[in-house]
Amino acid sequence: DIAHLHTSDLAWKQDELQTTEIVLKKITYLAAKEQWQDVIQLCKRLQKENPSSGESYQLLGDAYYNLGNLVEAINAYKNAIRFQPNAAWSYYNLGRALSQQKTWPDAIIAFQHAFNLSPSLPNIHRNLIHALEQQAIAENKIGLGAFYCNLRKLNEHQNTNLEQAKSTLETLDKISLENFLTSNSYIQFPDVENPKISIILILFNRAELTLKCLQSIAQN
């Protein structure tokens, strides 16, 4: 009976996939009951059996986030993304945790990834706008009237269709480029003597897309 679940009573089965599915359901149940310490214990135990369980890291991050342990939450969300790179919620929750730390540049990148993967995530526009605003304020920028105007327009896209999503994404990319060029930020690639892969970029005079591409390569 799942209602009487206790972490010490779990019987681990040899079939890893079946075990993972069953345990994730039990962790999700515990999370719904906000039993965060049990969630943490069970997630860690599952990860010993299945280290690549991205969903368990997502749930682990949620537990740490709700307990106010932002450092561990961020680490967990990053691991979730490592094993599930297309998990929009992991990027979204990573952005929330980074925003709590006021690490605005990284929060912006996380929210942008979440938006790219799923533009209809609840409050994604508002959270991204807030992070962009706070980053601009932190850098004490001058003459950002157009910048804030674009941000206010983005907030109107609550029911985003495909064309609106494209328009919003283009605006976000241009804002990101402006933010990058007017800051002291830079993109650093590791110096690898024998790279496993070479990438050739064909540019089309779209600096905002070039920046986005380079950031994605550097991150991955």
Image: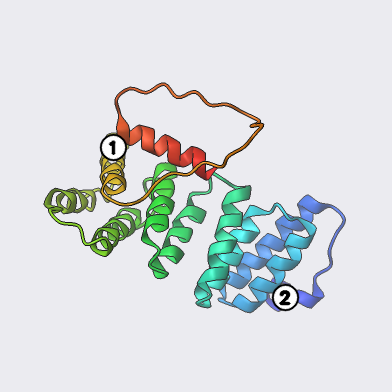
Locate residue 194, reporting x and y percent: 66, 31
Q: Which mark is residue 17?
A: none
Could you tell me which secondary element the residue under label 2 belongs to? loop
Q: What residue sits right under mark 1 in the picture?
A: 170
Q: Residue at x 44, y 41 (%)?
A: 215
- Residue 103 is left or right of residue 17, and the answer is left
57 or 210, which lies in front? 210
Q: Residue 62 falls in which quadrant of the image?
A: bottom right
Foreground: disc 2 or disc 1 = 1
Q: Residue at x 70, y 52 (%)?
A: 52
Locate residue 127, reporting x and y percent: 33, 59
Question: Pointers 2 and 1 in contact (CB under 8 A)?
Answer: no
Name which residue type carries label 2: Leu
> How many numbered marks appear?
2
Choose the circle earlier in sequence order: 2 or 1.
2
32 or 102, which lies in front? 102
Locate residue 171, reporting x and y percent: 25, 41
Label 2 neighbour load within 10 Å: few <14, some 14-19, many 20+: some
Q: Quadrant of the C terminus?
A: top right
- Residue 163 is left or right of residue 33, and the answer is left
Label 1 neighbour load within 10 Å: few <14, some 14-19, many 20+: some
Q: Residue at x 43, y 44 (%)?
A: 187
Q: Residue 160 falls in which quadrant of the image?
A: top left
Residue 61 position (above or below residue 69): above
Residue 211 position (above or below residue 69): above
Label 2 to label 1: alpha-carbon separation: 48 Å
141 or 9, which lies in front? 141
Residue 219 position (above or below residue 104): above
Q: What residue sits right under mark 2 in the picture?
A: 5
Locate residue 15, reporting x and y percent: 84, 52
Residue 127 position (above or below residue 175): below
Q: Residue at x 66, y 30 (%)?
A: 196
